Amino acid sequence: MKQYKFYDLMDDLPKEVQMAVREARKPFGVEAAKRWGLCETSEAYEIDITQVYPEPRFTVRLNGVGTLPRGDIQAVKAKSKNGKSFLCTVFVASVMGCKDFQFEAVEDGAKVLYFDTEQNERNTAALAKRVYSLMKWSTERNNERFKAYSLRSAAISERLPIIERVVRENAPTVAVIDGVADLLEDFNDVGQSSEIINSLMRLSAENDVAIINVLHTNKRKDDSDMKGHLGTLLLQKASDVFEVKKNDGTFNVSESDCRNIAIPDFSFSIGADGVPIWSLDVKTTKGEEELMEVLAKMNTIFEGVPDGFTYKELTEKYMMEAAVAERTAKNKIKFAKDSNIIKVDGKKYVLVDNDPI
């Protein structure tokens, strides 16, 4: 029997009732309306330029630059045994407030789920203990802020449903799928790959969770592409792609692809106890130096001025704050807008809510 959603019956209702339903739906937002069947098919996906869409909600920052946004998927890639899981350990500990690295957690009390599809229970437990060590937690009892699952023994068809159920039950800030290729039979199959990526994007959006997907790169030494059609789709859809390369015991991390602002490259090594250690100071490029400079200036200018400035006012404020000519000030304003530091709200420029500093 066909299941009808409310809007399937809209055409049969009086015009005034249709208008009342549309008005009543507005406070709930489009996503809720979609779930409850209160959206006409095309209307559910139409962009409304009068609406203010939320900025990315980053879960962690490095040198003031946010990354791992909630409601989106990310990727970690590397050759086999090149530190992908260790990098995820760095990420999840940092998200939960670990101070051993130069990352800064965005929210207090963040929760993380870790799904390991490759290792047995003993090895997954060892990974969890590394996280506990970084967090300075006792291993005498489980901590509800971090839960790890070994899914290697689960049937392939059962793994994604388990992940979906656990995510919905626990409402995490971040979830890691260490071995996303193990969620399908054939990572080169277009249909299977599309279904998995679409399911993960939907899961991340509906549950406001950042989902980090770990995937091997191709075996050829000079090929850094993620393997299979699954890797191609993950590259296209991920908000951030991080690559790990091992060199003489040091793991070097770079953000190879990013939809927002890429974080600086960084490195770590592994201590005698098997726990990651921050190796080097974060490298700062010329572009990142400009970003930090403009971020700092804009924060000072907008401090105590939530309503923002007109373009002319902001230009004058920047000229005074930075002691630069008008042309330079206008170039910096354009740079700040392109870098998602400021935005236009109506007729005024305002600071973006997720400003990294």
Image (cartoon, rainbow, N blue to C red):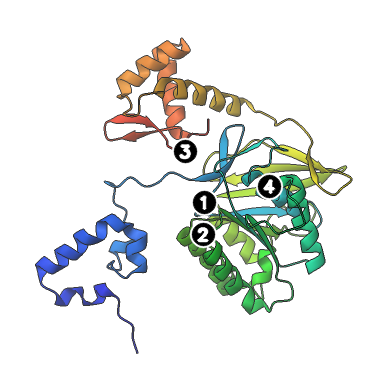
Q: Amino acid at mark 4?
A: Ala
From the viewer's perspective, tell me whether residue 240 is left or right of residue 276: left
Callout 2, which amino acid? Ser
- Residue on which the image places disc 2: 204
Q: Is residue 95 above or below residue 328?
A: below
Residues at marks 1 and 2, CA–CA distance in whole angstroms: 7 Å
Pair 2/4: label in front: 4
> Is there any visible trace of residue 27 in the rendered image?
yes
Discs 2, 3 touching: Cβ within 8 Å: no
Name above or below for residue 147 compared with residue 187: above
Q: Is residue 212 visible?
A: no
Check whether the beta carbons of the residues at disc 1 and disc 2 lie within 8 A of each other: yes
Per the image, the residue denoted by label 4 is 93
In the rendering, at what x and y percent does residue 198 appear? 51, 66
Q: Residue at x 62, y 25 (%)?
A: 286
Q: Circle 1 — which element?
A: loop
Q: As drawn, is 283 to the left or to the right of 59?
A: right
Marks 1 and 4, how far apart at CA? 16 Å
Disc 3 to disc 4: CB gap under 8 Å: no
Given residues 223 and 66, the one toward you in this image is 66
Which image quadrant for residue 186? bottom right
Residue drawn at 66 percent across, 28 percent down? 284
Residue on which the image places disc 3: 354
Percent from the top left, x then y, of residue 259?
52, 45
Q: Earlier in the sequence, mark 1 or mark 3?
A: 1
- Under mark 3, the amino acid is Asn
Image x and y of residue 72, in percent: 52, 54
Residue behind mark 1: 70
Q: Residues within 10 Å of mark 2 (few under 14, many from 20)?
A: many
Tell me the quarter of the picture where residue 18 sits: bottom left
N-terminal of the two: label 2 or label 3? 2
